[in-house]
Amino acid sequence: MKLTLITGLTGLLLLATIVELLRRRQLREKYAMLWLGVLLIVIPLSLFPRLLDNVAGFFGVVSGVSLVLFLGIVFLLLVCIHLSWEVSALEEETRTLAEDFALLRAQIDAERAARDELVSSDG
């Protein structure tokens, strides 16, 4: 009973945190939807703890706790893969922007040098 209460309160606390981060625009909607999806699973399971054992039995897992642990690890691995993909895309974008910036800076420097040369030859 105590674990059920703690799980439910933790789910509600996480829900409030996600809503607040969304409100402050510190969490993008696509990530909020992911975490809200997790909460749609966690909160009902905290309200109906026997449901977890029934779901585990359906999949042939002996204990509901083992199923939660396995699914939690799979979920975290998927989140890590997704975040690695996002970081890779951002690194590529940063490299491209740095190259564009370097080309623009070189062009500006060349134009300044040409202007300075023109001013000095006129004077």
Image (cartoon, rainbow, N blue to C red):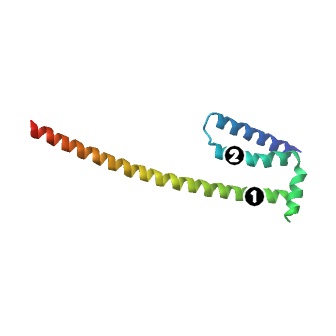
Name the foreground residue: 29 vs 52: 29
The residue carrying mark 1 is 71
Residues tagged 2 and 1 counted as in contact (Cβ below 8 A): no
Q: In front: 61, or 83?
A: 83
Disc 2/disc 1 C-alpha distance (Å): 18 Å
Looking at this rendering, what residue extends furthest in the bottom direction? 60
Question: Which image quarter holds the N terminus?
Answer: top right
Instruction: Please tell me which residue is depicted at 65% across the width and 46% down the height of the picture.
Output: 31
Q: Specify few, some or many for label 2: CA neighbours under 10 Å numbering under 14, 14-19, or 20 or more.
A: few
The amino acid type, in three-letter code, at marker 1 is: Leu
Q: Quadrant of residue 84?
A: bottom right
Which three-letter amino acid code belongs to the residue tagged 2?
A: Met
Where residue 33 is drawn, which disc sits there? Answer: 2
Compared across the picture, whether 25 is left or right of 75 comes to left
In terms of depth relative to the viewer, which is nearer, 52 or 117? 117
Residue at 68%, 55% in the rendered image: 76
Q: Which of marks 2 and 1 is in front?
A: 2
When the figure is inspected, residue 47 is found, relative to residue 20, above or below; the finding is below
| Secondary structure found at label 1 | helix
Q: Residues within 10 Å of mark 1 (few under 14, many from 20)?
A: few
Looking at the rendered image, the quarter that the C terminus falls into is top left
Q: Is residue 90 left or right of residue 41?
A: left
Q: What residue lies at 84% left-to-right and 57% top-to-bottom? A: 64
Q: Where is residue 15 in the image (x, y as percent from the top left)?
A: 74, 40
Residue at image location 19% in from the left, 41% down from the top: 115
> Measured from the top left, where is residue 50 in percent x and y?
90, 52
Residue 92: x and y in percent read: 47, 55
Instruction: Give the image quarter of residue 23.
Output: top right
